Image (cartoon, coloured by chain):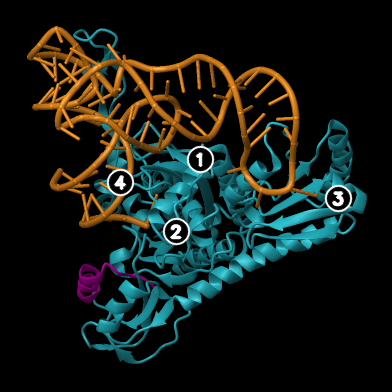
RNA sequence: CGGGGUGUAGCGUAGCCCGGUAUCGCGCCUGCUUUGGGAGCAGGAGGUCGUCAGUUCGAAUCUGGCCACCCCGACCA
C-alpha cells in the first residue's frame, strides 16, 4: 500500500482523512455514517478512557450502565431536550423479521411484530437515567448521586466525518443529582475543570473554558459549560461539555427528595460528556504530514525498538541487549515494543512507526553493540541522537516527559498566535478569511446579533470565557454597548 | 434534502469519447541476494469491470433504471 499523505497545507480535510485511514485509526464501514475503530485507534481511546475514568473515580463518581433503548414516552418527558434531539433519532418500531414470500432468501419486517410503543435509540441518556433516579432518590441522604456511564449513542447526522461526527459514537456521560443548586453548579464546573485538566495534561491540547450562549446551549440545560480547542487549520473544536440542568429533568421525571427539614424539593442535576471526537482533536492538534503524533501519556506504545542486523547471530546479540533494556523500561511503567520481525526492513519500520505516531523509536545495530550505544529518535521533532545504552533508561523517562511538554507548548503557542482581538466587523471578516483562528470581540449579548454574524461569516460564538476580564466596549456588529469580549471562531 | 463526483484485483488507477472480456503501480505468494530511512532481481497467483435491464453477433465501453460511497452546502457534539 502506498502511504501518501496529502499535505495539510494543500487540503486540510483530505490530510485529516488520510491520517485517520493510513495510521490505522479508523475506517468507513458498510453502514452509512458509521465507522470501524481499528485496533490502533481503539487502543488510544482506551488510554483516554483509563485516564478519564480514574479522574472521575477520584472525584467521587461511580460507573453504571443504562439501556440503549428509550421508550418514546420517557424520551419526550423533558420537552426541550426531546425537541432538540427529535430530528436526529433512530427509532425501533418492530422486533421481528420474516422470510419474504415474494423474494426467496430475503427478509422483510414482520408487520405483525410492531411494538406497542416505539423505542428511541439513545442520542443521550438523561431520560432513561432520570426515570431510574426517581426510584433511587427519596431523601437528602441519597444525595449527591454521582454516576457515570461509558456507552455508545446514536445521532442520525446528515453529514459525517471520521471521529468528528459519526452517526454512532462512543462517549462517557456523567449524570449527577444534588440537593442544592449551588452544589450542582459546582459539580458542573468541577467536571469542566476535569476535562480541561485532561485535555491539557494528557491530550496536550490547550483549551478555553467557557459558557455557551443560549443558542448553543444543550437542550434542556440551564447552563452549558464547554472547553474549546483550536485546531491547526484555525477552526475551533468543542472538546467537552458540562451542563447545569437545574431542576428541569427532576421536574419532568418527578424526582423529589426530602430535605433535612422534611420538606420535599426537586433535585438539582448535571450531566457532562466527552466522546471519541477527542480522537479528532488529538489528530488535528499534533499530527503532521508524516502521520500521526501521539502524546506519550496516551500512546499505547511509547517506545519501539528496531534491531538492525545482518546475520542471525547479530540479531541474537542485539536481542540480548534489548531484553535487558526492555526489562528496565517496563519496570518504570514505560510501554515498549520490540519489533524483531524479519519480514520488514528497518527503513520500512521507521516510516511505519512515524505514520502511527509512536513517540520514541530506538534503533540498535551491530555497530552499536561494539560502541555500547543506541540511536534514539523522537516523533515530535523527527530528530535523532546517539546515546550510550547505560544512559538509556534515564534518558527515555526524561524524553517522554519532554515530548509531552513540547507538544503542549507548541499547541499553546499556536493557539495564542492564532487568537486575535478585534474591534471592527470589517476586520473580523477579513481575519476569518485570511488568518482564521479564535477572535475575541465585543458582542451585545443578543441572540439576533449572534445569528446575523453566523449567517454572514459562518463564525459562531464558541463561548463566553470563564476567566474573562470585564471590559467596556461596543458590539462589533450592532455597535451597542458591551461589557466583555466573547470568543468567536468557525468551528467543526 | 439540494449541487458535484466516483464505483474496474486487497489498495490506487488506465481503458470508456471511437464496442472485440482488461493496463500500470503498490501490496500478496515462491526463490535467491539484502537489512543504519519505505530493498533488488527472477518467477507466480489474484477480476461475475457496483447492480439490474436494454441495444448488439459481441458491452468495462452505448442507453435507461436502481444502489452504494465520497466531496461541497443546509443541520449538528
Label 1 or label 3, whichever comes before in sequence order: 1
Q: Which residue is mark 3?
A: A368
Q: Are marks 1 and 4 in contact (CB under 8 Å)?
A: no
Q: Chain of mark 2?
A: A
In terms of secondary structure, where does tag 1 sit? loop
Q: Which mark is residue A2?
A: 1
From the top left corner, tell me how far across and down residue A196 is, in percent.
54, 65
Q: Kindly identify which chain the residue marked by label 4 belongs to.
A: A
Q: Position of residue A449 (x, y in %)?
A: 22, 76
Q: Which numbered disc, 1 or 4, marks the residue that appears first in the sequence?
A: 1
Secondary structure of the residue carrying tag 3 is helix
Residue at image point 84% right, 43% down:
A322
- Tell me the colour chain A is drawn in: cyan
Q: Regarding mark 4 in the picture, which secondary structure is present there?
A: loop
Query: Dot 4 surroundings within 10 Å: few (below 14), some, or many (20 or more)?
Result: some
Which quarter shows the C terminus of chain A?
bottom left
> Is residue A359 rendered magenta in the image?
no
How packed mark 3 is, by other alpha carbons closer than 10 Å (few <14, some 14-19, many 20 or more), is some
Q: State the residue in front, A274 or B8.
A: B8
Q: Is residue A131 left or right of residue B16?
A: right
Q: Is residue B38 above or below residue A475?
A: above
Magenta-tinted stretch:
A447-463
Q: Position of residue A33 (x, y in %)?
A: 35, 40
> Is the residue at mark 1 from the same chain as the one at mark 4?
yes
Amino acid at each position: 500500500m502506498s502511504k501518501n499523505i496529502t499535505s495539510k497545507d494543500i487540503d486540510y480535510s483530505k490530510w485529516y482523512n488520510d491520517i485517520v485511514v493510513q495510521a490505522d485509526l479508523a475506517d468507513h464501514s458498510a453502514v452509512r455514517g458509521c465507522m470501524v475503530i481499528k485496533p490502533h485507534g481503539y487502543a488510544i481511546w482506551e488510554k483516554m478512557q483509563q485516564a478519564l475514568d480514574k479522574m472521575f473515580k477520584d472525584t467521587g463518581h461511580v460507573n453504571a450502565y443504562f439501556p440503549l433503548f428509550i421508550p418514546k414516552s420517557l424520551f419526550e418527558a423533558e420537552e426541550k431536550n426531546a425537541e432538540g434531539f427529535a430530528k436526529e433519532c433512530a427509532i425501533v418500531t418492530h422486533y421481528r423479521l420474516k422470510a419474504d414470500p415474494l423474494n426467496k432468501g430475503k427478509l422483510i419486517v414482520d408487520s405483525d411484530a410492531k411494538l406497542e410503543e416505539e423505542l428511541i435509540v439513545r442520542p443521550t441518556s438523561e431520560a432513561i437515567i432520570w426515570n431510574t433516579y426517581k426510584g433511587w432518590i427519596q431523601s437528602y441522604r441519597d444525595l449527591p448521586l454521582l454516576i457515570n456511564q461509558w456507552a455508545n449513542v446514536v445521532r442520525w447526522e446528515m453529514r459525517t466525518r471520521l471521529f468528528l461526527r459519526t452517526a454512532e459514537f462512543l462517549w462517557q456521560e456523567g449524570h449527577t443529582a444534588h440537593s442544592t443548586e449551588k452544589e450542582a453548579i459546582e459539580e458542573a464546573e468541577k467536571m469542566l475543570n476535569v476535562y480541561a485538566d485532561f485535555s491539557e495534561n494528557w491530550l496536550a491540547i490547550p483549551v478555553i473554558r467557557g459558557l455557551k450562549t443560549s443558542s448553543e446551549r444543550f437542550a434542556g440545560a440551564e447552563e452549558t459549560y464547554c472547553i474549546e480547542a483550536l485546531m491547526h487549520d484555525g477552526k475551533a473544536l468543542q472538546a467537552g461539555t458540562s451542563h447545569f440542568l437545574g431542576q428541569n429533568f427532576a421536574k419532568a421525571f418527578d424526582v423529589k427528595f426530602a430535605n433535612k427539614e422534611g420538606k420535599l424539593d426537586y433535585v438539582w442535576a448535571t450531566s457532562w460528556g466527552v466522546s471519541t471526537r477527542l480522537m479528532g482533536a488529538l489528530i488535528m492538534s499534533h499530527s503532521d504530514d508524516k502521520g500521526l503524533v501521539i502524546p506519550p501519556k496516551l500512546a499505547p506504545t511509547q517506545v519501539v525498538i528496531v534491531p538492525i542486523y545482518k546475520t542471525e547471530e547479530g540479531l541474537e546479540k542485539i536481542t540480548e541487549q534489548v531484553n535487558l533494556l526492555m526489562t528496565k523500561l517496563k519496570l518504570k511503567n514505560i510501554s515498549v515494543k520490540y519489533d524483531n520481525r524479519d519480514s520488514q526492513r528497518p527503513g520500512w519500520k521507521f516510516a511505519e512507526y512515524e505514520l502511527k505516531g509512536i513517540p520514541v523509536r530506538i534503533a540498535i545495530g551491530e555497530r552499536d553493540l561494539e560502541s555500547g550505544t543506541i540511536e534514539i529518535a523522537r516523533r515530535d521533532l523527527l530528530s535523532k541522537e546517539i546515546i550510550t545504552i547505560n544512559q538509556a533508561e534515564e534518558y527515555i523517562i526524561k524524553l517522554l516527559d519532554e515530548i509531552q511538554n513540547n507538544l503542549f507548548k507548541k499547541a499553546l503557542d499556536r493557539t495564542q498566535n492564532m487568537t486575535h482581538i478585534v474591534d471592527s466587523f470589517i476586520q473580523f471578516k477579513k481575519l476569518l478569511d485570511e488568518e482564521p483562528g479564535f477572535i475575541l470581540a465585543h458582542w451585545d449579548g443578543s441572540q439576533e446579533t449572534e445569528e446575523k454574524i453566523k449567517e454572514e461569516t459562518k463564525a459562531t460564538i464558541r463561548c463566553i470565557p470563564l476567566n474573562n476580564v470585564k471590559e467596556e466596549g461596543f458590539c462589533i456588529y450592532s455597535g451597542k454597548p458591551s461589557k466583555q469580549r466573547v470568543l468567536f471562531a468557525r468551528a467543526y
